[in-house]
Image: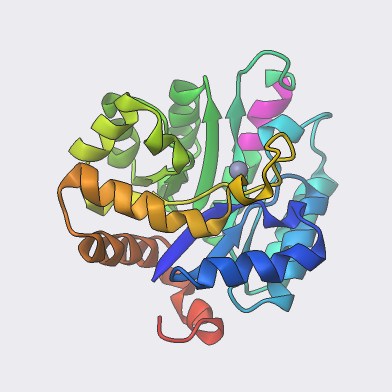
Amino acid sequence: MLIDTHVHLDSFPDCEIPLILDRAHSVGVGFVICAGTTVESSARAVDLSRRFNSFFAGVGVHPMDIVKPLTGEDYMELRNLAIKEEKVVVMSEIGLDYMEGMPDRAWQFPAFREQINIARELDLPIIFHSRGAHQDCFRVLKEEKGYEVGGVMHYFQGTIKEAKEIIDLGFYISIARPIFRLPHLQEVVSKIPIANIVIETDSAPQPFKKNRDNWTEPHYLRSITKKIAELKDMDEASVETALFHNTRQLLSHRWGILNKYVPDL
Ligand SMILES: [Zn+2]
């Protein structure tokens, strides 16, 4: 079984979601974890998780979406969503983004810190986003003791040194479709132990791609798994087993709940 640890299926219209999940199931994807990007999108991810067995949710506010400072009420809503719904299994998507034009860092930092603290309070693994901000993300995760709950550096595209640094802090690196086009990432995957890797698609609507069939969906996990097997000179079944085991470790506290909704875990 393959598990998509990071998608944004909440951004698709309702009618598309069962079709996307069917296409995923047909290649062996057992379930997906949908990351919230705002309080509203987190609430929608939670709502969808109630409607589809193989759909689980994360709650969080994405650094790109911090268009004004988060308030105590925002944090309370995130906390309540996670407390009320057992299918919330991670704090996601939080982090720092230093790309030009992104929200004020003076707003991003407290949001990242506070959401790490909510994750620790609720014992939820942290799925974090970092763009041009790796060292600051690692520092904040250390200062706020994010390693106590661990988690995933999502959509990893960093160096081997950065991979080792975050793995040492107790996090997995998550590999997505950039594995097909970035030679340095292929080298990272060939050298980092399979025990430290999980996979994802970060699937969201991609209207800039004219052919709908080329939009990234969870079913692409199959080709990502094949690519990892090729790079590590392993057979695909062993890679799939290892990735499954890693995700099980990541979500170990919630595995009983996952098992209620997904048979054969
Ligand atoms: Zn994402």
Name which quarter of the figure residue 129 lies in. Answer: top right
Q: Is residue 10 left or right of residue 2?
A: right
On-image quarter of the C terminus: bottom left
Residue positioned 73% across, 19% down in the render: 104
Assess whether residue 108 is covered by the magenta stretch: yes
Indicate whether 19 appears above or below 225.
Answer: below
Residue 189 screen position, x and y as percent: 27, 39
Q: Position of residue 244 (x, y in %)?
A: 34, 66
Ligand 1 shown in quarter: top right
Corner quadrant of residue 142? top left
Q: Is residue 241 left or right of residue 47?
A: left
The location of residue 109, given as percent across then percent down, is 64, 27
Q: Is residue 54 left or right of residue 16?
A: left
Residues in magenta?
106-112
Q: Residue at x 31, y 25 (%)?
A: 184
In the rendered structure, does residue 91 fall within the stretch colored magenta? no
Most foreground residue, 85 or 226 = 226
Q: Quadrant of the N terminus?
A: bottom left
Residue 34 in the figure: left or right of residue 247:
right
Q: Residue at x 61, y 25 (%)?
A: 97
Across the whole image, how many numbered discs are drawn on residues? 0
> Residue most toward the left?
233
